[in-house]
Amino acid sequence: MSVAEEYYKTKDSTIPAAVQRELDDYFTKLAEDPLYRSAVSSAGIRLADVEACGRKGITLRSPTAGIVGAETGILVGFGSVVLHDLWKQVLLPYLKWRLGPSALRASGPVSRKRVGRQAKGRESRR
Amino acid sequence: MPYPTHLPFEKMKTLAARLLYLDCIPHVPGDIHHPGTTAEEVAQVLNYLHGQMIQFTNAGGVSPDTQQLDKFLQEAAQRLRSSMDLSPFSLGGSQAVRHGLDLLHDVAQRLSCYSCSHPSKVCYGHPYHDAEVVSRGGECIKPLKRLFEVARDVARLYYSKYATNCGRLPAVEFSTSYDSIGQTLTVPYHVRGETEHASGEGNPATVRLYLDPQHFDRSTYWVVPYVLFHECICHAFQPMKSQPGRTAEPYDGFSEGWMDWVAYSILNRLCLGQDPGGQLVSQMPHAADNAREAGIFHGARQHVSYPLDTSNPEAPTVLHGVTTAKRFFGVLDHLPGNSDNNWPMFFRISFDLNLQHEWNMETETFFRKLASNLADPRKHKQIKSCIISFLKSNDIRSLIGRILALPS
């Protein structure tokens, strides 16, 4: 279950697959490359917590038409608060660097869900 | 402060290969003379070569991060040359482009990632690591860095020479970013620019070129100086841009129109070898092409069509700013101390306005009022007297104040 979920409009229909690929690639590099690891630590995020959750803690899915209409988008779910922090501070800038700033655009009303105190509470019970 | 970011590694490889090709291979069949070969034959060969180039320079998916950029370029150059050996064209046609291919091959062979930056580091796909290497060295995109340096140096030279008191201008750094840029205007350029100001006085501005290397073609390459001149002359030294929460748009007619005409005019004058900075034109190997493409892009940015073109929503604002600038330039005719040349005074006033620390409601009203008064030739005399007063006081605020005091 996700403790947080964010919705992004995507530039085109190829972006969700590209995000999937880039995330896989990022986590592989994170496991191998000290510079990637130090970037996470520099962002104030505990690397051990990220590794405990792993790549599978971030899920990507297509939004249902009922929520956002027919536009192209992607819903990103986070299995823990630390992954949500990683996304905001490291992964999203990384993805925008890789795919271009217009590839992912945060959307309004459904962009954040169950984030904050409630989400933290849920994680602490895990 | 971290180094400015640059393109992801595989996109940098593609861009470097494109730059190498565009600089080495001639493009106009008529420019290539080979005994017994017609221009048509040469055109066919160039067309074929272009197709091969697109195939061999695309690093995405075929060149892993473990392959160094120099090795990728050398391989691409070798494949390009071999493809010509196997091509179905006449010996004469192939020979006609042989010189360009040999040059490309030689340049690629000489390039070494190990001698690019100091201390010696080699790009491998990491965003920060590679950004440092490219910022320190960046041999692979040297043609673009050189164009940026010309734009930055010209901007600095002009502001220092003409602005009343430009003070200490901030450093300007160069950055490249990837974006899949479609044709937003009616012109086929896959490049755009952006200037970012770090908060705090004296912090460097960063001019960022957004590129899509897979679509980086000759006309995009040639228009790059215009984009860089726009960023360096219009935005790099604007103190107001560093203010947080800058969202108001009306005065962008000044930034995006008036100042764009200034930037475009300076680039044109540079390409003609006029004015300070003229000697820098030797750093621009395609100056005539740069000037031509700049004219097309500059024109397209202010092309207002009816019904309004949604892909070019800024056009009315840009057009308004350019028109106002041109009218103001005309008003400078026959002013005392102006001799036959309006440019020095026009540059001075433009830069003084652009260096204003505050663009607020008052200055927005100033620009609107100036534009409306310039639109009426009967009011030009009053504007002239405001300018004469400014020339005595050397205070741009006095010009703004006097224009604001004009009747609507």
Image (cartoon, coloured by chain):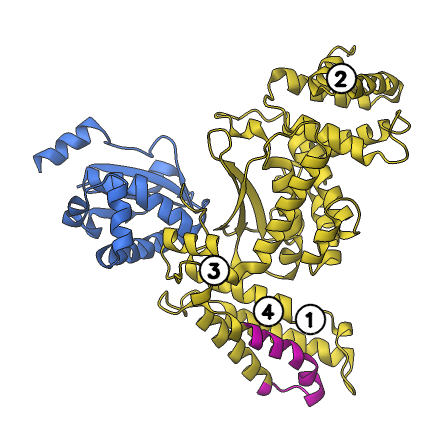
Chain colours: A blue, B yellow
Q: Marks 1 and 4, Cα distance to the nearest angstrom?
A: 9 Å
* Mark with earlier residue (1, 4): 4
- The chain carrying label 3 is B
Residue closest to the eye, A5 or B153: B153
- According to the picture, the residue beneath numbered tag 3 turns out to be B12
* Mark with earlier residue (4, 3): 3
Identify whether B5 is placed above or below B18: above
Identify whether B232 is placed above or below B246: below
Q: Nearer the viewer, mark 4 or mark 2?
A: 2
Q: Please state the horizontal and vertical placement of residue B68, each as a whole percent of the image.
A: 41, 68
**What is the quadrant of residue A118 in the picture?**
top left
Task: Using residue B133 as the reference point, say whether residue B22 is left or right of it.
Answer: right
Tell me if residue B49 can be seen.
Answer: yes
Q: Please state the horizontal and vertical placement of residue B255, each as a whole percent of the image.
A: 65, 32
Marks 1/4 in contact by CB < 8 Å: the verdict is no
- According to the picture, the residue beneath numbered tag 1 turns out to be B26
Q: Is residue B198 magenta?
A: no
Identify whether B110 is placed above or below B293: below
